[in-house]
Image (cartoon, grey):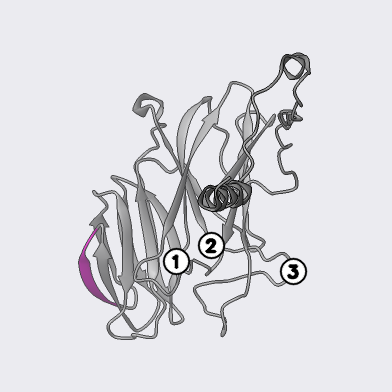
């Protein structure tokens, strides 16, 4: 072999050794050999739906109405909840023992106007006595007559709201005004600005009452039907321009009664 040819052969061998080995094609024996099987992940079983969380109190309606078997009787209680206003005010009287709220006006309005009881027309009285208007809160029926009187030497009555009038009376004087519009009348004094206002609620029919010192109240027996229950207190939300009125639907069956619970608080 010539030297030139030997160098060329040696160079080719060196190049071939540097190359990556080429895999040979599978033989017939390799074809029959089973291939490796990769493990397949099992599907995650569906989780059962979580059980509902227990122990969370349902939000309380306010006022809350609980039906009972006291046929036609609607009774209830008004209580204060939370921190009491300081200093105490004459407009909000909270019983120390029961936290009941006195002087809450509670009344019913039948949904069916044909059911509305008709009361005889009468005269209701508001008097100025010993630096106060008495009664402090008065319920009247539309069409009633309001009679003003005083046992003081001199007293004035300035009305705003569902009726407007102005009267200044001497001891023994009397003056009357018709109550022809529904709603709230507030009676104030200009002669004695410190005198606590009086309130007159003029209703379609006098299906109402006032809560006692302990916050308890009871309405006259009512026939079955649909009613709108209204509650109002002059000292509730005293930080607002006007006291609020709470309302709720009330349904009475033939043998049903109802217990009403209303909670007052200054919390928003």
> Which of pointers 1 and 2 lies earlier in the amino acid sequence?
2
Range of the magenta residues? Answer: 163-169
User: In this figure, which residue is indicated by the disc labeled 1?
Assistant: 234
Is there any visible trace of residue 63 in the rendered image?
no
**Depicted 161 relative to depicted 26: above or below:** below
20 shown above or below 177: above
Pointer 1 and pointer 2: residues touching (CB < 8 Å)? Answer: yes
Task: Let me know if residue 1 is in the magenta part.
Answer: no
The mark that comes first in sequence, 3 or 1, is 3
Q: Which of the image's four quarters has the N terminus?
A: top right
User: In the rendered structure, are the residues bearing label 3 and label 1 in contact, judged by CB atoms less than 8 Å apart?
Assistant: no
Q: Is residue 220 above or below residue 232?
A: above
How far across and how far down the image is residue 213, in percent? Answer: 64, 64
Vertical arrangement, residue 206 with respect to residue 47, above or below: below
Residue 103, labelled with which disc? 2
Relative side of 129 to 18, left or right: left
In the shown orientation, is residue 231 left or right of residue 167?
A: right
Marks 2 and 3, Cα distance to the nearest angstrom?
17 Å
> Which callout, 2 or 3, points to the residue nearer the camera?
3
**Which image quadrant for residue 138?**
bottom left
User: Horizontal and vertical percent for residue 158?
Assistant: 26, 72
* Residue 87: image location, x then y, percent: 56, 85
Tell whether label 3 touches label 2 (CB within 8 Å). Answer: no
Numbered tag placed on residue 97 in the rendering: 3
Main SS, magenta region, reads strand
Residue 220, position as x, y percentages in the image: 56, 39
Which-is-in-front pick, marks 1 and 2?
A: 1
Task: Indicate left or right for 228 with 58 as reference.
Answer: left
The residue lying at 58 percent from left, 71 percent from top is 93
Quarter occupied by residue 205: top left
Marks 3/1: CA distance?
A: 21 Å
């Amino acid at each position: 072999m010539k030297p030139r040819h030997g160098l060329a052969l040696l160079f080719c061998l060196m190049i071939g050794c540097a190359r990556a080995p080429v895999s040979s094609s599978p033989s017939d024996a390799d074809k029959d050999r089973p291939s490796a099987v990769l493990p397949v992940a099992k599907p995650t079983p569906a989780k059962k739906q979580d059980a509902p969380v227990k122990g969370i109190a349902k939000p309380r309606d306010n006022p809350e109405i609980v039906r009972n078997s006291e046929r036609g009787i609607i009774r209830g209680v008004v209580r204060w909840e939370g921190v009491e206003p300081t200093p105490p005010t004459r407009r909000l009287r909270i019983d120390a023992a029961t936290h009941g709220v006195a002087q809450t006006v509670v009344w019913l309005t039948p949904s069916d106007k044909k059911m509305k009881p008709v009361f005889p027309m009468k005269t209701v009285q508001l008097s100025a006595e010993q630096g106060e208007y008495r009664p402090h809160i008065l319920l009247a029926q539309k069409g009633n007559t309001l009679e003003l009187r005083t046992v003081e030497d001199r007293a004035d009555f300035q009305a705003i709201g569902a009726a407007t009038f102005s009267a200044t009376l001497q001891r023994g004087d009397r003056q009357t005004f018709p109550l022809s519009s529904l709603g709230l009348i507030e009676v104030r004094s200009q002669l004695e600005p410190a005198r606590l206002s009086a309130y007159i609620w003029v209703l379609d029919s006098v299906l109402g009452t006032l809560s006692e010192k302990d916050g308890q109240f009871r309405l006259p027996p009512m026939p079955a039907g649909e009613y709108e229950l209204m509650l109002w207190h002059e000292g509730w939300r005293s930080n607002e321009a006007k006291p609020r009125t709470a309302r709720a639907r009330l349904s009475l069956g033939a043998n049903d009664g109802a217990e009403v619970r209303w909670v007052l608080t200054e919390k928003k």
